[in-house]
Image (cartoon, rainbow, N blue to C red):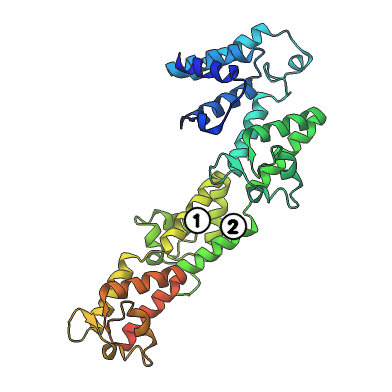
Amino acid sequence: QAHVHLFVSLVAMDRVYSAEQITVPPSLPGILKGFTKEVIRHQPQDILDFGAGYFAAAKKGSLEDFLKGWGSREVKKAPETKGQRSGLTAGHSSGLTSAEEKQILELFSKIDLENRGVVLAKDLSRFDKNGKLFAKLDTSKDGEVSEEEYLAFFKGLKAKNAKAIEGYLAYAEKTLLKLTVGEEEDILDLFSKVDTDGNGVLDKIELYRFDKNGKLFGKLDTSKDGKIDKAEYLKFFQGLKLKNPKALWGYLRYAQGCLKKLTLDEEKEIKSVFNTIDVDKSGEIEEKELAKLDKNGKLFARLDTSKDGKVSITEYLNFFKKMKVDNPRAVYGYIKYAKRVLKM
């Protein structure tokens, strides 16, 4: 009964005297957001009756059954309307069918790449170059569009022009399936960073940090020549977007994160270079020991962050970790140069 009492109390509350009198339970916003969505979706004739049943079912863990049962109940209670005779779903006074509503919410989810539960202007930019659509959707003028605002827009659109909603949904779905200019740029930038030797193709070693078992390489290497060019790389991500737009965004974010960390092989190579430079095996590098790689002493000054006249293995590794964040390919270049000069 706790949920029911909470709901009735909120409805009965006439005014709030001061902010200090209110303590909002952490779970309350989520509970009320879920309830509000179902009210908009089901359009009950008696909201209080619907609310009492909703919260009672939520407490018992049988909310899904309640919502299914409520839909059937509304069909029995409501007289047949012109909209229902033409095939519209009962309980949807807006005129949207269940199939349309489902498609609209799926589209909303695809646009909301970061799973925030709201859509921002930047998320909508591929359909809305000048921002006019976002301005219409954002009825609350808070800089974000909720599912409720998104649905409300399409309900209004359906009322004005039934064919317009079908056309927009088809256009939006088609647009979502294409890589945007920004996505192509991000993918090619990622390719360039993974291509540590700069030869224009990727091999298994370069892709290893993202692909321990080689399965991804097998999918990317469609020509089966043991290397991946830019065309193959782009084609893979185009296919990934067709299947799941969020998976594309998720992979790019994951890969960019991996690129900012030294791989185990890179750490091993850096430590090997350090040990070779450390001629007297003191566990630290002195300026004279670095002379072959650092004629003017500028590199030593950057490595010696503690300013004690020597460089520890920790300082040496930290220098390359920062280099990896700023320019991943530079790490590979330095290791290659150092090994050549030191004749390793």
Give the amino acid type for the residue marked by disc 1 in the picture.
Leu
Which image quadrant: the C terminus? bottom left
Tell me if I can see residue 68 in this picture.
no
Q: Position of residue 170 (x, y in %)?
A: 71, 39
Q: Position of residue 172 (x, y in %)?
A: 69, 43
Q: Secondary structure at mark 1?
A: helix
Give the amino acid type for the residue marked by disc 2 in the picture.
Glu
Which residue is label 2 attached to? 183
Residue lying at 52% horizontally and 15% vertically, measured from the top left: 66
**Quarter-of-image position of residue 103:** top right
Which residue is label 1 attached to? 252
Residue lying at 41% horizontally and 78% vertically, measured from the top left: 333
Q: Position of residue 236 (x, y in %)?
A: 53, 55
Residue lying at 58% horizontally and 43% vertically, measured from the top left: 112
Q: Secondary structure at mark 2?
A: helix
Residue lying at 38% horizontally and 64% vertically, measured from the top left: 261
- Circle count: 2
Q: Residue 152: give its label.
A: none
**Which of the pair 309/78 is nearer the observer?**
309
The answer to whether the residue labelled 2 contacts the one labelled 1, judged by CB atoms less than 8 Å apart, is: yes
Q: Viewed as shown, does residue 105 lie left or right of 131?
A: left
Which image quadrant: the N terminus? top left
Q: Viewed as shown, does residue 143 lie left or right of 80?
A: left
